[in-house]
Image: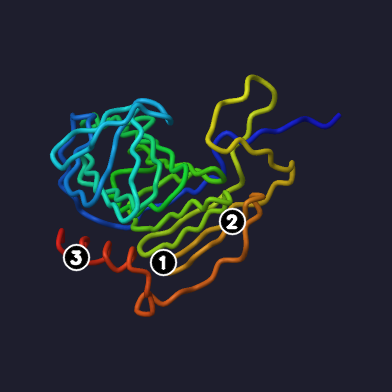
């Protein structure tokens, strides 16, 4: 008997560590806004009400962040990891735990838009996890730099600049109440094996959850202003 399978998060993306020495500052669970351009708002639900988010403010668990056209916002974690959101983006913080000498846990959702992440190597394995989902993806991050795009058509594209990424099939739930989402979707029962992406590899996952083949890319040929801007900001922080 076939079972109805509903996607609640999407394709799993596990990012594995690269060697790095960091000096993180733990203990805080709040996320700081360290840079902002254009209009960015924050709310407690997907539909608001919304209030202006400015540099210097903190973002707590359960918050939704929405950027307008031509807007940008940078979020700093207690462990020195950085997330930047591009224009026309809707983002939610689900979990943010950064206890010293214990498992660090961070999870979020990128409903639509663009996210650039530069994650320190303290995540993953026994040291904790760093997860971000899209309508067709869940990203588990550790010690890497990557660009994640969630399209209006529910497609997902991930480009890895440092580290490795393991991309798996959608997380699913069988039966039970359906979770409210911006785009509730139904996926097939077909499953596929995890795909490992290395440095300077890119993967596209279609709206139906089907992955393409990994492709190499040349960062020197990047003409996306979003990518170039993030690379410049990363260089300033090194």
Q: Is label 3 in a helix, a strand or a loop?
A: helix
Find the distance from the CA under tag 2 to the CA under tag 3.
29 Å
Dot 1, how many residues are within 10 Å of its Cα: few (below 14), some (14-19), or many (20+)?
some
Residue denoted by label 2: 205
Find the distance from the CA under tag 3 to the CA under tag 1.
18 Å
Q: Earlier in the sequence, mark 2 or mark 3?
A: 2
Residue denoted by label 3: 235
Residue denoted by label 1: 199
Find the distance from the CA under tag 1 to the CA under tag 2.
18 Å
Dot 3, how many residues are within 10 Å of its Cα: few (below 14), some (14-19), or many (20+)?
few
Outermost residue toward the right in this view = 1
Outermost residue toward the bottom in this view = 221
Q: Earlier in the sequence, mark 3 or mark 1?
A: 1
Q: Which mark is residue 188?
A: none
232 or 105: nearer the viewer: 232
Query: Which quadrant holds the C terminus?
Result: bottom left
Residue 71 appears at what percent x and percent y?
29, 52
29 or 182: nearer the viewer: 182
């Amino acid at each position: 008997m076939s079972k109805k399978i509903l996607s609640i998060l999407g394709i799993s993306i596990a990012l594995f560590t690269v060697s790095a020495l960091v000096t993180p500052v733990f203990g805080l669970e709040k996320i700081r806004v360290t840079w902002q351009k254009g209009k960015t708002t924050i709310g407690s639900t997907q539909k608001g009400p919304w209030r202006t988010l400015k540099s210097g403010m903190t973002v707590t668990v359960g918050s939704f962040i929405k950027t307008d056209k031509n807007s940008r916002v940078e979020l700093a974690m207690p462990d020195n990891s950085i997330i930047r959101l591009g224009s026309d983006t809707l983002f939610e913080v689900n979990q943010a735990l950064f206890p010293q000498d214990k498992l660090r846990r961070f999870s979020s959702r990128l409903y639509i838009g663009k996210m650039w992440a530069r994650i320190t190597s303290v995540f993953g394995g026994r040291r904790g996890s760093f997860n971000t989902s899209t309508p067709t993806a869940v990203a588990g991050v550790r010690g890497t730099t990557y660009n994640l795009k969630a399209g209006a058509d529910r497609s997902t594209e991930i480009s890895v600049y440092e580290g490795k990424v393991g991309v798996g099939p959608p997380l699913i739930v069988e039966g039970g109440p359906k979770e409210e989402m911006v785009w509730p979707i139904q996926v097939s029962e077909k499953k596929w094996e995890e795909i490992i992406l290395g440095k300077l590899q890119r993967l596209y996952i279609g709206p139906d959850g089907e992955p393409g083949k990994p492709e190499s890319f040349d960062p020197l040929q990047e003409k996306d202003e979003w990518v170039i801007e993030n690379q410049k900001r990363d260089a300033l922080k090194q």
